Image (cartoon, rainbow, N blue to C red):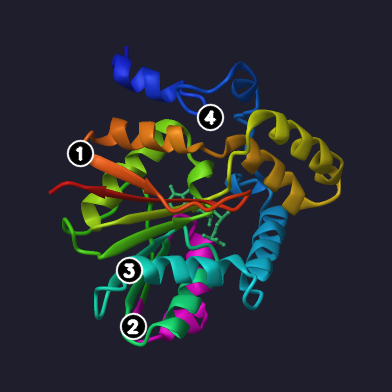
Amino acid sequence: MVYVDSRTRDIASMPRGGPDASWLDRRLQTDRLEYLDRDDVDDLKRKVMDSLDRAGRRRRIGIHDKCARMVLREVADVPSPRILELGAGLGGLSSKLLERHPTAALTVTDIDPTFVAGMAASDLGSHPRVTVREMDATAIDAPDGYYDLAVFALSLHHLPPVLAAQVFDAATRAAKKLLIVDLPRPPAPLHVMLLAVVLPLTKVSPLQHDGFISSLRAYSPSALRALANHADPAITVEFRTGRGLGPTVAVASRAR
Ligand SMILES: C[S@@+](CC[C@H](N)C(=O)[O-])C[C@H]1O[C@@H](n2cnc3c(N)ncnc32)[C@H](O)[C@@H]1O
């Protein structure tokens, strides 16, 4: 029999809206997998990732550029920062970082070997300031504090709470700061309305299919705090999120 302690049980069953989630918010979640999480739908998975990457690379309004600016703000006081990108997908964010910073050294990683092979074969793979490699964000093999910053963009919601807490643990050990950028979790009544608008599109658009599930799996700020606290009470989380329905932006670091 496998023994599971009560702290692990508590975090495993924590609602995506956090320990204090309302009755309605607790119903707005799912264990259903996105195409991106599945190994039996390669074609759909590729379509979702290509659409995400195309949208991300749009000039100025693309999320990759926005994330790159957030990353660089966090390491503004480090002349030649060492940056680890986790869950990099096709590498759009790291490409923007290279454009925007003349000396940053990047380790660009993903758990999916196909995405890693794609990035290795792209311009990123041959760039002198870049290392591309496979890496699980829950198990980072780097010395303590090796990186100035680790970034996990649009990815944390893919992981269930126990694994998401492991990301906080691993990344705040290997890096001085962990920047999480992810989908927002809207207030529950608004969330219902937004989901109702997107639902009909999920049948025709693989991207909307995954977006719908992502929205149900997005962690609230209180959930992120609980995940970090479960990983180690010495981890603090600050939010950089502005007003409205922009992404959730959190910076975690561990007192050393
Ligand atoms: C929605 S995509 C985001 C990709 C990229 N960050 C972007 O913004 O375009 C989520 C990514 O997280 C990766 N991923 C999922 N679980 C992971 C894990 N445990 N460790 C590292 N990457 C993971 C997936 O392979 C996928 O590339």
Between the residue at mark 1 and the residue at mark 2, the CA separation in whole angstroms equals 32 Å
Q: Which residue is mark 1?
A: 234
Camera-nearest label, 2 or 4: 4
Q: Which residue is mark 4?
A: 17
Q: What residue sits 47% from the left and 22% below the top? A: 20
Magenta segment includes 28 = no
Q: Which residue is mark 2?
A: 129
How crowded is the residue under tag 2: few (<14 C-alpha within 10 Å), some, or many (20+)? some
The kind of secondary structure element at disc 4 is loop
Q: Marks 1 and 4: CB-CB under 8 Å? A: no
Q: Is residue 165 above or below residue 46?
A: above
Residue 6 in sight here: yes
| Residue type at tag 3 | Ile
Residue occupying the far left of the picture: 256
Q: Which residue is mark 3?
A: 83
Magenta segment includes 114 = yes
Work out whether mark 4 precedes mark 3 in sequence or the reverse, and give the earlier one.
4
Please state if 221 lies on the left or on the right of 46 as rendered.
Answer: left
